[in-house]
């Protein structure tokens, strides 16, 4: 998919204020610092798209970007260490769970995880939350430039095994990316295009 236009549309914390049209959307989410802004800027071929919507604090918002006037790229707040607690509701602020449970235009989520790290409970719980709520998702491994190919394969295997040992019967689609080296971009964009065309 060639990116012709990428425009910031709206930021808010209230799913009822998200765009009302029926344009399909794809949500990007992951732990703080996972490389989400860098990935969004790489996908959109735009140096500062993910940050242009932002003043400090604005990261705690649902940000809609319109790509090629065809689909929304939705930048969701990073979940993080600070919000780890026993209850899902506290881990993932209520407006985020409202988004996932109410947003009919959402086609699929992309859960970003740092390829260098072992699966973290908060990420696995979040994927489980998506599964329980019937929300399709893919995994995007970030920062692949930091590892050698065999270490990448090994870490992906660990994820696959953990997913299959938990509630999953099959592995969700996954993408290995590096925003620094601009890898994985076509794979993610072509995947989105293939869904949009169906
Ligand atoms: P966010 O908090 O998830 O939006 O993460 P950022 O995109 O701001 O990235 C967090 C840090 O990781 C920054 O220092 C980035 O330069 C770095 N980073 C992001 N993507 C990559 C990548 O693909 N490779 C490497 N080596 N570093 C990255």
Image (cartoon, helix red, strand yellow):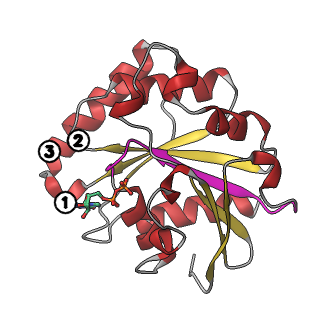
Q: Which residue is mark 1?
A: 145
The image quadrant of residue 79 is top left
Q: The residue tagged with tag 2: helix, strand or loop?
A: helix
Q: Residues within 10 Å of mark 2 (few under 14, many from 20)?
A: few
Give me the C-alpha separation between circle 1 and circle 2: 13 Å
Q: Of label 1 and label 2, which has the lower sequence position?
A: 1
Q: How many marks?
A: 3
**Mark 1 residue's CB less than 8 Å from ligand 1:** yes
Q: Which residue is mark 3?
A: 150
Q: Which residue is mark 2?
A: 153
Q: Residues within 10 Å of mark 1 (few under 14, many from 20)?
A: some
Instruction: Give the magenta range.
Output: 21-34
Give percent across and percent down for residue 122.
Answer: 40, 26
Q: The residue tagged with tag 3: helix, strand or loop?
A: helix
| Quadrant housing the N terminus | bottom right
Whether the residues at callouts 2 and 3 have beta carbons within 8 Å, the answer is: yes
| Quadrant housing the C terminus | bottom right
Give percent across and percent down for residue 96.
Answer: 62, 39
Q: Residue furthest bottom?
A: 4
Residue at (52% x, 20% y) in the render: 168
Give me the C-alpha separation between circle 2 and circle 3: 5 Å
């Amino acid at each position: 998919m060639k990116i012709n236009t990428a425009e910031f549309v709206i930021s808010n914390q209230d799913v009822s204020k998200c765009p009302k049209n029926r344009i399909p959307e794809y949500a990007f989410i992951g732990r703080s610092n996972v490389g989400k802004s860098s990935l969004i800027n790489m996908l959109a071929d735009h140096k500062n798209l993910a940050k242009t919507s932002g003043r400090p604090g604005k990261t705690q918002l649902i940000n809609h970007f319109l790509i090629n006037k065809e689909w929304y790229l939705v930048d969701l707040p990073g979940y993080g260490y600070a919000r780890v607690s026993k209850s899902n509701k506290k881990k993932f602020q209520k407006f985020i769970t409202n988004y996932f449970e109410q947003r009919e235009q959402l086609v699929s989520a992309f859960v970003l995880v740092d390829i260098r790290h072992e699966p973290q409970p908060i990420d696995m719980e979040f994927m489980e939350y998506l599964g329980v709520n019937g929300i399709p998702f893919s995994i995007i491994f970030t920062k692949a430039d930091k590892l050698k190919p065999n270490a990448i394969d090994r870490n992906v295997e660990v994820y696959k095994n953990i997913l299959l040992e938990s509630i999953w019967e099959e592995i969700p689609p996954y993408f290995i990316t590096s925003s620094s080296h601009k890898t994985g971009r076509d794979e993610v964009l072509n995947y989105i295009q293939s869904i949009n065309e169906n």
